[in-house]
Amino acid sequence: MVIKAKRRNIMLKKVVLTGLIIAAFVVGQAFFTTANAVEIKIATILPEDSELGEAIKYFKELTEERSGGEITVVPYFGAVLGEEKSVLEQLGTGDTEMNVGGSGTIIWHAPEYYITGIPFLYKSGQQVKELTDRLIEERIRDLLIDRINVRVLGGSLRAPRNLLTTERKILYPEDVEGMTLRLPTYESWIEGWKMFGAHPTPIPGAEQFSAFQMGVIEATENPLSVLYSMRLTELGKYIHLTEHLHALRIWSISEPFYQSLSDEHKQLVEETANIAIDYLTERNLEVDNEVIVQIQEQGLEVVVPDTNAFREQVKPVVDKLKDSWAPGLYEEYVQPLLAE
């Protein structure tokens, strides 16, 4: 009986010991998984059903899949985390990990490098994309890390901005004389349109529809998809394919967060972000081509102005603004493009 009891005790101890080992292994695995788990909050002011919303969800899918679940991406659409300036501050402190915004990232924090905002100056979106990519790689990335603790990963080319008018048909620069045009308060945009005799009128984007109705403005400009989605084309008569400005959606990541990642995760996030960046460029241009058909169905006349005439007339704006640019920027980056 004593021997049997001893055997039972030994067996019981083995069972308990085995259980403890298994429990320790499970806890250890859970701790290891938790310790290596990474969450990326990514913000934008645009809605989920936008082309940018699609691209962010694609970035989420790629990143989570390729990391084997080690990285979780949590999107915040529609300015839930705040307006873009506020979110960039959050990136600087590491409270938010990523943001996809507009040209403001450069205009606010590296204004001496904002050289793509003069209307009609550049011949194509591809030219602007290559110029901006080069600036980011050679100048802007390190500058913004130093200034605001934010690393720029890259930029998606947006659809070009075009001109919508209620009554005027614009073919040549002289047709713009005296036209009241809604514009954001960016110096290079305003100075460019003033060269043609326009009267730039700063009106919040959300108030454009009523401003058209009341005759406060007779023209506005934006990518075709924006003009259409905001119902501004319902009030217009002419849509002008000026393609006068090309801009990028800037993808940024918190520098403190970036430095906390393993080398493997850094490489993975950069790769999936670049894939999403290219995807968004393609979607933006696809949607623009689709929207022009819908605008024509509304009855608007599509006009193709003489953009070369506009380009020649706006060049003096470069002379006016280039002294405010970073040293050597005009000679190294802009002048060669204007000579093409």
Image (cartoon, rainbow, N blue to C red):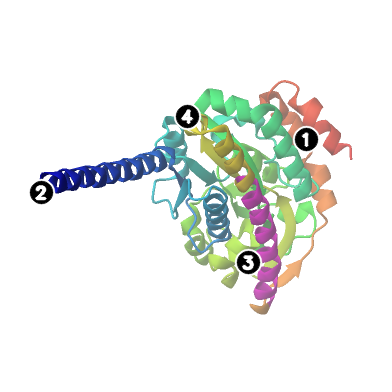
In three-dimensional space, the C-alpha distance between marks 4 and 3, rounded to whole angstroms, equals 49 Å
Q: Which residue is painted at 51% across and 67% down in the image?
A: 213
In three-dimensional space, the C-alpha distance between marks 4 and 2, rounded to whole angstroms, equals 67 Å
- Using residue 231 as the reference point, say whether residue 158 is left or right of it: right
- Image coordinates for residue 201, horizontal then vertical, percent: 56, 49
Within 10 Å of disc 4 (Cα), the crowding (few <14, some 14-19, many 20+) is some
Q: Which residue is painted at 80% across and 43% down in the image?
A: 313
Is residue 168 visible in the rendered image? The answer is: no
Q: Are marks 4 and 2 in contact (CB under 8 Å)?
A: no
- Using residue 248 as the reference point, say whether residue 201 is left or right of it: left
In three-dimensional space, the C-alpha distance between marks 1 and 2, rounded to whole angstroms, equals 107 Å
Viewer-nearest of discs 3 and 2: 2
* Amino acid tagged 1: Pro
Mark found first going from the N terminus, 4 or 2: 2
Foreground pick, 321 / 245:
245
Q: In the rendered image, which residue does mark 2 sit on?
A: 1
**In terms of secondary structure, where does tag 4 sit?**
helix
Q: In the rendered image, which residue does mark 3 sit on?
A: 166
User: Image quadrant of residue 2?
Assistant: top left
Provide the residue span drawn in magenta.
273-296
Mark found first going from the N terminus, 4 or 1: 4
Mark found first going from the N terminus, 1 or 2: 2
